[in-house]
Image (cartoon, rainbow, N blue to C red):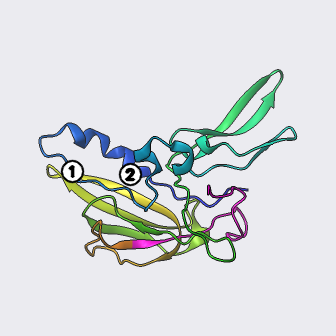
Amino acid sequence: MRPFLTSLLGFLLLAPSLVQSQQPMLILPTENQGLLHDDPASFYQCVQRDFEGQVSQPWEGGQYGFVRNPVRFGSAIIYTRFHEGIDIRPLNRNASGEPTDVVHAIAEGKVAYTNTAAGSSNYGRYVVVEHSFDNCPYYSLYAHLSVILVNPWRPGGSKRSAGDYGSYRRGNRSGASPCSPRA
């Protein structure tokens, strides 16, 4: 089972633009500021892992590149799934345990695509925003949303909400996160 996740693939694609002549104004996509305060465990969403009877909830699971799904192969352990995004720990939840944080674009841009059908991808409901830095297009993706509040090819600036966190569990797409939010 996957915890509630918000994947932001495009955020990492913006790194090359930081060396350009015009540096983009970027913001974090939620109110979670743990990354800026040297507290990655409060920023990244943990992953529920049960491997060979040992249960763990590593916060590192929310980082880009974290390798998931360990499988024993003889005496070696092989990890079978590369994590392609950044999963941010929600700060707010409703009485049912569902995340309720608002998700904003990381910079000014236009909504390039929305997927409103939660079951049609591993990202659930998601929004793709096209940004332009030094006349080059860059894309950011906001996934696992409970609701999408924008329309394609309309401005989707950083001050405007793209949607709200949603829940994602393979199969039913609902239920409380197995990882407790930090107090």
Question: For the residues marked 2 and 1, what is the alpha-carbon distance in whole angstroms?
Answer: 14 Å
Nearest to the observer: residue 42 or residue 77: 42
Q: Residue 144: where, in percent of width, then height? A: 55, 65
Residue in the picture at 32% in, 56% down = 27
Q: Secondary structure at mark 2?
A: helix
Q: Amino acid at mark 2?
A: Gly
Nearest to the observer: residue 28 or residue 122: 28
Horizontal side, residue 133 vs residue 100: left or right: left
- Count residues near mark 2 (Cα–Cα under 10 Å), then give few for <14, some for 14-19, many for 20+: many
Quadrant position of the N terminus in the picture: bottom right
Residue in the picture at 33% in, 63% down = 129
Quadrant position of the C terminus in the picture: bottom right
Q: Which badge, 2 or 1, is on the more N-terminal residue?
A: 2
Above-or-below relation of 164 to 59: below
Q: Nearer the viewer, mark 2 or mark 1?
A: 1
Is residue 168 rendered magenta in the image? yes
Region of the chain picked out in magenta, as a range: 162-183
Which mark, residue 24?
Answer: 1
Residue in the picture at 57% in, 63% down = 121
Question: Residue most toward the right?
Answer: 53
Q: Residue 163: where, in percent of width, then height? A: 45, 73
Nearest to the observer: residue 87 or residue 13: 87
The answer to whether the residue labelled 2 contacts the one labelled 1, judged by CB atoms less than 8 Å apart, is no
Q: Residue 61: where, in percent of width, then height? A: 61, 44
Question: Label 2 belongs to which residue?
Answer: 10
Question: Residue most toward the front?
Answer: 183
Above-or-below relation of 81 to 120: above
